[in-house]
Amino acid sequence: MDKQVTIELTHLQNDGDIALERMYRSYKAEFFDFGRRYLSSDEDISDIYQDTVIAMYEKVATGQLTELSCSVKTYLFSIGKHLMINRYKSNQQVKFELFEEVDLAGSIDVYPPELSLQAEKLKTVILQLEDGCQRILTLYYYRNFNMESIAANLGYKNANVVKSHKARCMKRLRKLFLSS
Amino acid sequence: MEVNDRDKYLIERYIKASLTPDEEVEFENRKGDTEFSREVIFQSDLRDAIFAVKRDKLKQRLKHSNNPEASGKRIFRLQYILAAASIVILVIIATVALLRYESPNVDQLYAEYFESPPNIVAPMLKSDEDKASTYDSAFQLYEMGDYKKADQAFELLRDDDNVQFYQAMCKLNLENWDDAKTGLTSIYHADGKYSKNAQWYIALIEIRLGKIEEARLSLTQIISLKDHPYQADAEQLLRALNTL
């Protein structure tokens, strides 16, 4: 794997949201030029670019993407292309004639799942939890961290402290969920 | 049947997609149990919900990432045309803001960027409920959001880095700006473990008090330090400040 690609992926994995924003800025102007080949609305391109960067970040943060055989830019733009096709399907304002150039084979799974009713309700409940709980649950479920890594990341004494804290957070979450 | 510890372990491994082949068989066998299946669905939905919350937060963060180059060449061309007019307007706005000494938007900016740090010194544990020390109790009052009582409790404790910083955070949450800034300034100059955190919160206080030039200077200092944990936030905040 190219050294520059390794560096960028490592930054995304380790520095989290800060690296995400750095990547977002790095390729934004080029993505807009690229996007205008397909879409006529800058607003749509901006929206898709945000989803594109988040989709790639999610794959790196969750450990699904650890190496690349192409550059970060190529990977990012291929996600973007798929998202633009998806937007095309729901919005006839796109420059559809250009889509003939797009290779639809080997599409990348970047679309977030439709939330169930229970998940929608849980989403509301999560936002009612205190910041500490939100951080622990995010590192546990989103970043796939174990208790030791969460302790190190958030500055807790040890994994047992995190385990107890997480158990209290889950108890509160279930209570809020049942009463909502 | 109730969900037991083994079930919880299996569900956890399933959610994290790390079941071994043997565990996968065990998991499939347990799926016939109603309580087990219900917990699997709950945990899967919780994971999806956490992903959705995180995506929303990231999207908001990116939306606010106001990079002038980001909008591309079309806007860049437009900037040429509007540049002179914009400069004049910005100068007028800046002058009015300086004369008034307080912009109506600083409250919003402060609210957007201020986040009370979590209690990582002595987190509340169920087993601690009856035997928390005076020291831990002060932090637990802070964790519960009872900043007034926490402030009083910290006052009675021996001054260490943790006490000083979290007491300043209590004063900040109580909107006691002057005392908070005095405490944070002392922490900043002591160059201890909370020095960089203090620097960030001082900048926020300056914004909240409408001391825009001082805030700009503080933020610029933060940005100039490569390893500063608030560097990216400071860059973003400075950009937002420049649009006021």
Image: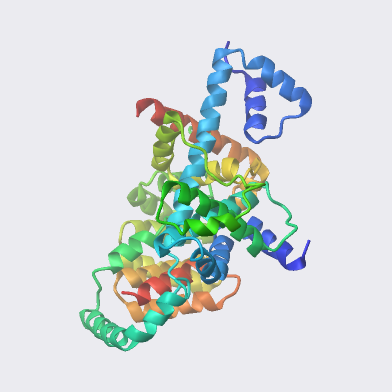
Residue B65 higher or lower than A58, as above or below: below
Q: Quadrant of residue A41?
A: bottom left
Horizontal and vertical percent position of residue B138: 44, 48
**Quarter of the figure with the N terminus of chain A:** bottom right
Q: Is residue A132 visible?
A: no
Q: Residue at x 76, y 67 (%)?
A: A3
Which one is in front, B217 or A79? Answer: A79
Q: Quadrant of residue B177?
A: bottom left
Residue B205 higher or lower than B100, as above or below: above
Q: Residue at x 61, y 13 (%)?
A: B32
Residue A58 higher or lower than A172, as above or below: below
Which one is in front, A36 or B244? Answer: A36
Horizontal and vertical percent position of residue B192: 56, 68
Which one is in front, B182 or A13? Answer: A13
Which one is in front, A48 or A67? Answer: A48
Asked if residue B237 lies left or right of residue A27, the reply is left
Q: Is residue A21 visible?
A: yes
Horizontal and vertical percent position of residue A69: 75, 58
